[in-house]
Amino acid sequence: MTKFNNIINLETVDSTNNYLKDHLTEFESGTVLFSTEQTNGRGRFDRSWFGEKYKSIFSSFLIKNISEPEDALRYSFLFSLGIKDLLSQYISAEDIVLKWPNDILIGDKKITGVLSEFAQNSVIVGIGINVLEFIPEGKIEMPWTTIEKETGLKLDVEKFKFELIDHINNAFIKYNAEDPKNITRLWAEEAEILGKFVTVSHQNKKISGTVLSIDDLGILKIAYENNIINISTGDLEYND
Ligand code: BTN
């Protein structure tokens, strides 16, 4: 079972995911790389990810020798569950929304982004968390928030790093990461996504329908007009 216990702290990088990917052979499985500052953070669909030195978490978690490439996807859902557990120490669990595939929102405002990438039989799961209030350098496309804004708490970002690692390690035990095939189903229960009416947008296409199921890769089946459509990527919105 992977346990994250090798912690690396850097001062500045372009992207913690890039750094781990470029230095993969130097790091063992179970490494967590933090950087105080990130100058070119990336999100899904090549979007930028912003945060600020001493106010945001920029981290990447490394799992090597995964059994099959598909596990990379499955683990990203597990990390979201761990982060939800972490945030629920400070924010009421009912207000924390797991948005497919890996976003975490407070109401409709994004507080955490997860970017999971597969390279050389390893998975790198990048996590950005908005902890303290900050002024982004560029425009953030969707509504967003911070733990400070939601709670008034000025958390100690250094301590928070260790809480993050603990909650991820606990999630590996709690959600039985030995068998990653079950993770997406457990995520769907926690996200309460089944039966929800959603809209998914991808490359100028939008479909709205009811979520019927999720498979072990996180692919959603959505009832759309008189068909059932498989959705493997895109931006989802809850309509009800
Ligand atoms: C998303 O919401 O699209 C995912 C955002 C992921 C951001 C984190 S910050 C640390 C790690 N390094 C990156 O360049 N991206 C991830």
Image (cartoon, rainbow, N blue to C red):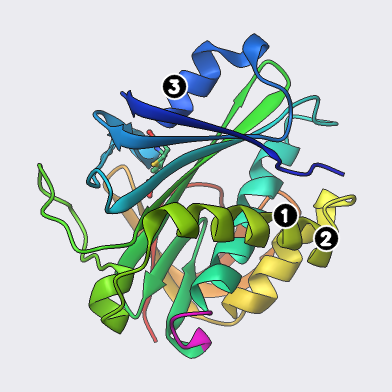
Asked if the residue at label 3 sits under 8 Å from ligand 1, the reply is: yes
Residue 225 visible in the shown view? no
Query: In the figure, is residue 24 to the left or right of 50?
Result: right
Question: Mark 3 — residue?
Answer: 18
Sequence-wise first label, 1 or 3? 3
Measuring 72% from the left and 54% from the top, which residue is drawn there? 169
Q: How far, Cα to Cα, is label 1 from label 3?
A: 23 Å
Question: Mark 1 — residue?
Answer: 169
Sequence-wise first label, 3 or 2? 3
Q: Does residue 149 belong to the magenta stretch?
A: no
Residue segment shown in magenta: 89-93
Q: Does residue 91 belong to the magenta stretch?
A: yes
Q: Are marks 1 and 2 in contact (CB under 8 Å)?
A: yes
Quadrant position of residue 35: top left
Query: In the figure, is residue 215 to the left or right of 178?
Result: left
Quadrant position of residue 148: bottom left
Query: In the figure, is residue 46 to the left or right of 159?
Result: left
Measuring 43% from the left and 83% from the top, which residue is drawn there? 91
The numbered dot on residue 203 is none
- Hey, what amino acid is under mark 2? Ile
Query: In the figure, is residue 62 to the left or right of 103?
Result: right
Q: Where does residue 161 sit, x and y in percent of width and height?
A: 50, 52
Residue 72 in the image: above or below residue 13: below
Question: Mark 2 — residue?
Answer: 173
- Hey, what amino acid is under mark 3? Asn
Q: How far, Cα to Cα, is label 1 from label 2?
A: 7 Å
Q: Where does residue 181 sit, x and y in percent of width and height?
A: 83, 52
For mark 1, does the 10 Å Cα neighbourhood hold few (<14), some (14 to 19), or many (20 or more) residues?
A: many
